Amino acid sequence: MVMAGAAHAQTTAKGTGPAYPTRPVRLIVPLAAAGSTDIVARIVAQKFTEVLGQTVIVDNRPGAGTTLGTGLVARAAPDGYTLLFTSASIATNAALYPKLPFDTIKDFSPVGPVGQSFYVLVVQPALGVGSVKELITMAKAKPNQILYASAGQGTITHLAVELFMANAQIKMQDVPFKGGAPALLAFLSAQVPVIFSPIAEILPHLRGGAKVRTLAVTNAKRVPELPETPTLAEAGVPGSDVVSKSGIYAPAGTPQRIVNQLNVEINRMVQQPEVRERFLSQGLVPIGGTPAELADYLKSEIARWSKVAKDARIKIE
């Protein structure tokens, strides 16, 4: 399989420049291992290794709200050997940080979207609510007294709750953690009663019989993994849909032939039954698409979360 992939890589670049790739490729994930973004990145790295004929290495570089790893790619040589695999954080950081060490729009060349995910509103039974409506009623009676766990201030799991609270006209108290894994652990151990968790992270626990209550999903429609769980719109809070698209970005200036080659492989990969099954088993949806579609998504998400952050008066220095 690798030999065939190597031949394909050589053929793709023939007549348009040096063959690519001729050495290992680094796929930087600006988050810790085991989260939903990392799960998808490792599927991508494995399949890319097979078709490109060179090892694609996942390099987790968490820190500084994902700006550490993202900045490494912004400053990397634009030769296709250092790529960024990220999701909503690249947009939320642009919306929140006034002085990023890179320009989110100008310093990257979008390669293409890979998959999309959503979040699940889950509560501990001890909280005493069995629906979104009951949670809203309790939050209105006890403003800022209900705690929710997030992966950190300014992360998508924080902003998704801010959007929900604004639309529901309630206030709950954020308990920020250093990443999604510790936030979920705190929730599952009943230290914090509410969480908006990525489906890929909470789903194994739901399947394992975790004694928690799923109240809603942030997807636009109900999902096969949780068919009895309503959307937030169905639960009476329209406008609260949150879908996070993961994608690959290259440093600005990367040759277009390399961007195009990688984009072709993304779209081939997400059509493979094995890959689709692995994505769907995690509650993720393989999508694929063009560089332009990923660029448009990035711009629209920056605008959306900029408004949420401004309305909620969230500032991160």
Image (cartoon, helix red, strand yellow):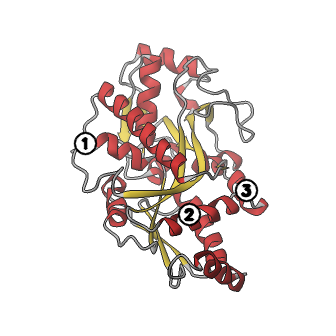
**Where residue 168 is drawn, which disc sits there?**
none
Between circles 3 and 1, the one closer to the viewer is 3
Q: Which residue is mark 3?
A: 276
Which of these two is toward me, 235 or 213? Answer: 235
| Mark 1 or mark 2: whose residue is earlier in sequence | 2
Between circles 1 and 2, the one closer to the viewer is 2
Q: Quadrant of the C terminus?
A: top left
Task: Say what amino acid the circle numbered 2 marks.
Answer: Asn
**Residue at x 37% of width, y 52% of height:** 178
Which of these two is toward me, 147 or 293? Answer: 293
In the depicted structure, whether residue 188 falls above or below residue 220: below
| Neighbourhood count class around disc 1 (C-alpha, 10 Å): few under 14, some 14–19, many 20 upward | some
Q: Residue 118 is drawn in which quadrant? A: top right
Disc 1 from disc 2: Cα separation = 36 Å
| Mark 3 or mark 1: whose residue is earlier in sequence | 3
Q: Residue 230 is drawn in which quadrant? A: top right
Left or right of 299 on screen, residue 266: right
Q: Which residue is mark 2?
A: 260
Task: Say what amino acid the circle numbered 3 marks.
Answer: Arg
Q: Secondary structure at mark 3?
A: helix
Locate residue 158, reporting x and y percent. 41, 38
Q: Residue 11 is drawn in which quadrant? A: bottom right
Q: Secondary structure at mark 2?
A: helix
Task: Say what amino acid the circle numbered 1 marks.
Answer: Ile
| Mark 3 or mark 2: whose residue is earlier in sequence | 2
Disc 3 from disc 2: Cα separation = 22 Å
Which of these two is toward me, 284 or 188? Answer: 284
Q: Which residue is mark 1?
A: 316
**Residue at x 51% of width, y 64% of height:** 259
Disc 3 from disc 1: Cα separation = 37 Å
